Image (cartoon, helix red, strand yellow):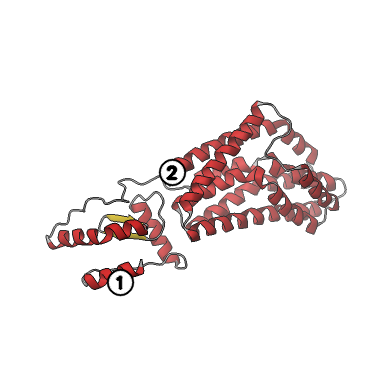
Amino acid sequence: MKPVLATLRQKYPELDVEELEIWHNQTNQQTFAAMSRQYGLKNAGIPLVLIGDTVLAGDGQIIAHLEERVLLEKERLHSGDTTPDTMAPGMVSTGPAVLTPQMVVVPALVDSLNPCALSVLVFLLISIAAAANRRRIFLIGGSYIAAVFLFHLFMGIGIFSFVTLTGLSKAFALIGAAVAVILGLITLSDVIRNKETFFLSVSESGKGVMSQYIRIASIPAAFVLGVLAGLLGFSCTGGIYISILALMSRSLTFTAGLPYLLLYNIIFVLPLVLITLLAAYGMSPEKADSWRVEHKRALRLVIGLVLVALGVVVFFGWFG
């Protein structure tokens, strides 16, 4: 867009152009997010031009309409008219709902109760509960939880930063919506057919690899186990996470989205923290495993419904 703006500056010396770079400048990122909300933009990407009450998004629209809008704005100002100009292509009258913490917390809570996420820690605690003191349970459980948290956080940061850097937020949102709906329907199908083994679960080979680290049950092994659980179980636990990332990519810059990523992953590991605390203070890990087995079908049902709902929400852009 720089040559286009340079030409317009020469042609219309009175034109005041302010360029704001949003990838490295946090203040400009906040301005960008605020202006996107103010102008009701569903998927604010760059390049983006704001002139008067008009928004032009994307190089094609800017090249086709910017000079026209400059002339209309110039004519309006010279006539003394202070009434906002009519909306041009790319402008919408009302904006989508702003992504709120509640929209992140509820899916994160559902995802945190995924049997895939809980089972590995439960088996690890079962393996050490009889011989370990409270301090050792905290250290080994904490090491596992820290690894799970960091894996999912950095996975989210990597995906979200790539999407915002490349400007592929719309494509990613559509792909994320499709993935969520497909995974949700697969999960619901397994529940309806009353299958014992769910399609979206850790493979038998993956379980074999993780069982080796469960038997070792050291602090480093627990950390490696957490990374493996995140990696091998992402097909099981990643659907809701991808959907939230897709929602964020439609309306938030990387800086604005980072707190939501932190919030999601803190919520995601809360049941793991609770199970570790209960095991350290005397509750048998077998009870936690019994609860997991007893309720896994109901939890899968809720997860499947949430996945389908999130996919529909992302696809239609109801929240950005």
Q: Nearer the viewer, residue 268 or 10?
A: 10
On screen, 227 above or below 302? below
**Where is residue 247 shown, x and y percent of the image?**
49, 47
**Where is residue 294 shown, x and y percent of the image?**
72, 31
Q: Quadrant of the N terminus?
A: bottom left
On screen, 258 above or below 297? below
* Location of residue 180 (image quadrant): top right
**Where is residue 6 shown, x and y percent of the image?**
30, 71
Note whether residue 18 is visible: no
- Badge 1 is on which residue? 6
* Location of residue 275 (image quadrant): top right
Report whether 49 appears left or right of 217.
left
Which tag is nearer the camera, tag 1 or tag 2? 1
Between marks 1 and 2, how big is the CA–CA gap?
Answer: 35 Å
- Badge 2 is on which residue? 317
Identity of the residue drawn at 71% across and 29% down: 195
Report helix, strand or loop for mark 2.
Answer: loop
